[in-house]
Amino acid sequence: MPCDEAVIATNDDASECKRSAVLAGYWQDEYLGLFVKNPTERKAPEINRGYFARVRGVEICIEKFLHRTAGRPCQIVNLGCGFDTLYWRLRESGHEIANFIELDFPTVTAKKCYAIKRNKRLLDKIHVAEDGEVRLSSTDLHASNYHIMGVDLRNIDELHNKLKQAEIDFTIPTIFLAECVLVYIEAQNCHNLLKWLATHFPTSVFVNYEQVNMNDRFGDVMMGNLRARGCNLAGVDACTSLETQVSRFLDCGWHGARAWDMVQVYQSLPNGERQRIERIEMLDEGELLVQLFQHYCITIAWNGELFQDIEITVEKRMSSLNID
Ligand SMILES: C[S@@+](CC[C@H](N)C(=O)[O-])C[C@H]1O[C@@H](n2cnc3c(N)ncnc32)[C@H](O)[C@@H]1O
């Protein structure tokens, strides 16, 4: 489908922008450059800072999950993973995750699998045991605690089947990540997905980063730009406000949910971190960054008592991203 192609291409943009911010010194990521070439053009400081807040905001949620599950086996399921390097960054910082599962369209996972096969530094980190066996196809890769598989998240039967291939455990604490993914999925398909996850994972948390406050001029321009590239934001109705972001999860049977715009997320970061990155580049237009932050948010939804009332504020520094 032509629209799927345009959605798939959004991964190249996201990866390139992250790489740009890493090269500028916003955070460290030794692995991203193994998946994506260096950008040909320097990105605007507002874009770099926006990506910093995105990556750091999602990371804080993961830190909280790891903090609350400390000592217990847990799972991470990265939906629409693109070229995200979280698995390798967590391994590097000493976190042992019982099962780390990455899912995206087969076109994307094929490229990621290819990069993993060709890079010893990536491959070394997924050989968990000395004799750890790695099973490979062109789009899927299975190691003992790392799995990446090609799947259309709109197809629940296929998703279920893939998760079984990855030896998913429905009973242990699980975090689902979706960074700019649900917005590309039609409302009914997204509803089916979130409902299925809520029903099957009684102890789980869902971290969703994506657009919000899209019913204004800024939202119109963003939608117009994407439409011009053949890409519809099929799930944009849930991105009307923080309330619609929350109610989408509650309507699908999640026990609770909270949402923060990126102004709030950025302000919740420790002062030292913000001061460090604010010294990296002068902003061309301060107002533009505020507008960007007002149009993205993080929503956390939870099932079960372990994650009840999870908050965005930083409790404890674990620095798995090596920000400092
Ligand atoms: C903007 S990219 C973000 C990639 C990654 N999460 C990140 O933040 O770096 C969106 C990703 O979602 C994936 N995606 C969107 N809809 C999907 C679907 N129905 N099934 C599988 N993957 C999907 C795209 O292929 C793409 O890799």
Image (tube, rainbow, N blue to C red):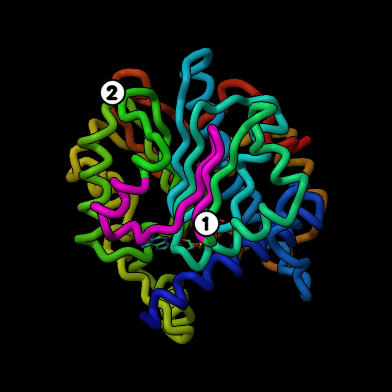
Label 2 element class: loop
The amino acid beneath tag 2 is Gly
- Whether residue 193 appears in this view of the structure is yes
With 149 as the anchor, is 189 left or right in this view? left
Give the number of the disc on residue 137: 1
Q: Does the magenta stretch include residue 140?
A: yes
Give the vertical position of 31 relative to 127 (above or below): below
Q: How crowded is mark 1: few (under 14 residues within 10 Å), some or many (20 or more)?
A: few
Which mark's residue is nearer the viewer, 2 or 1?
Answer: 1
Q: Nearer the viewer, residue 124 or 294?
A: 124
Q: Which residue is drawn at 35% across and 61% down?
A: 152
With 132 as the anchor, is 189 left or right in this view? left
- Which quarter of the figure is the N terminus placed in? bottom left
Q: How far across and down, in percent of the image, does residue 92 sit?
A: 72, 33
Q: Distance between the residues labelled 2 and 1?
A: 36 Å
Give the vertical position of 310 relative to 27 (above or below): above
- Which quarter of the figure is the C terminus placed in? top right
The amino acid beneath tag 1 is Ser
Q: Residues within 10 Å of mark 2 (few under 14, many from 20)?
A: some
Q: Residue at x 68, y 58 (%)?
A: 115
N-term-proximal mark, 2 vs 1: 1
Magenta residues, start to end = 139-162
The residue pinned by badge 2 equals 304
Q: Nearer the viewer, residue 53 or 272?
A: 53
Label 1 element class: loop
Q: How far across and down, in percent of the image, does residue 125 sit?
A: 69, 37
- Whether residue 109 appears in this view of the structure is no
Tally of numbered discs: 2
Give the number of the disc on residue 279: none
